[in-house]
Amino acid sequence: MSVKRVLFITQEIFPYLPESAIAETCRNLPQAIQEKGKEIRTFMPRFGSINERRNQLHEVIRLSGMNLIIDDTDHPLIIKVASIQAARMQVYFIDNDDFFSRKFTTEDENGVEFPDNEERSIFYIRGVLETIKKLRWIPDVVHCHGWMTALAPLYLKSAFADDPCFKDVKIAYSLYNDNFKQPFSDKFSSKLKLSGITDKHVKDIAGTSVDYDKLTQFAMKYSDGVIQQEENVDLASLEYVEKNKIKFLPYKGTALEAAEAINEFYDTL
């Protein structure tokens, strides 16, 4: 039976953020998949650089109001939504004043990456999954784009594995040339812990700083399939896919060029 629902979790979408490989893919691919007959939902962080008035974002009160505890600190979860009219596509935004009010995405005006990017990533993914539960929308495939989404596969295969919304879900993880410079701290594995996540789940990253290669491989370990979304990506990631015999879709061109192949790839997961 073909897949009917695809959840896109991304860190960038054009036109809300400037054009990039991730932003363009996540503008065009969900629309293309929707036009092929699948139902979609799309999420991204509500970075402070996004102009809410111009893009007509508004808060969804019935979905907001939950608090997520990360490293013993409560962080309120705010959900906003906007529409890309030309694509007939809604975009849900995960917001929080502590993490997303600053007028930049993942680094400051001097190009220095924010030291709390690891907590922002944890909050973002947990926020998406909790919102999907509130929506009671059951995806067949979750497709992750960008390193900020790298924890989704772990959470879906552990802490959220028995939830009715996710118990049968398959996970695709896209590879981009989206390296970050500042590794996550050696406390990262303890910060991301939730009920259902054991020491065994995080042993690959426990007690050590987590660089881009480690984080990407950690995401792929819990994914059902990997898609090469850019022509040039990290070689260590490709070697990991081959070594671990993960179901793989090599680079097929732009999002629009690759849409048919990706749509078929979903159905094989």
Image (spheres, rainbow, N blue to C red):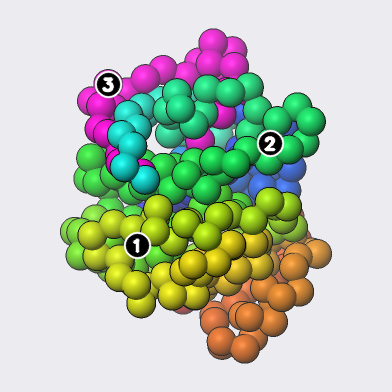
What residue is shown at x 73% (from left), y 38% (from top)?
Answer: 112
Q: Nearer the viewer, residue 137 or 133?
A: 133
For the residue carrying disc 3, how many other residues have a C-alpha within 10 Å: few (<14), some (14-19), or many (20+)?
A: few
Q: Nearer the viewer, residue 77 or 110?
A: 110
Q: Secondary structure at mark 3?
A: loop
What residue is shown at x 45% (from left), y 23% (from top)?
Answer: 97
Q: Is residue 156 visible?
A: yes
Q: Secondary structure at mark 1?
A: helix
Give the residues drawn in magenta, as a range.
44-70
Q: Is residue 15 visible?
A: no
Horizontal side of 154 relative to 228 (left or right) equals left
User: Residue under circle 1?
Assistant: 156
Is label 3 in contact with label 1 (beta carbons under 8 Å)? Answer: no
- Residue 182 point in image, percent of width and height: 68, 51
| Residue type at tag 3 | Ile
User: Residue under circle 2?
Assistant: 107
Q: In the rendered view, tell whether residue 167 sits above or below residue 248.
A: above
| Residue type at tag 1 | Leu
User: Residue under circle 3?
Assistant: 61
- Residue 268 point in image, percent of width and height: 46, 76
Q: Nearer the viewer, residue 165 or 76?
A: 76
Q: Quadrant of residue 117?
A: top right
What residue is shown at x 54% (from left), y 80% (from top)?
Answer: 247
Which quarter of the figure is the C terminus placed in? Answer: bottom left
| Mark closer to the chain start, 1 or 2 | 2
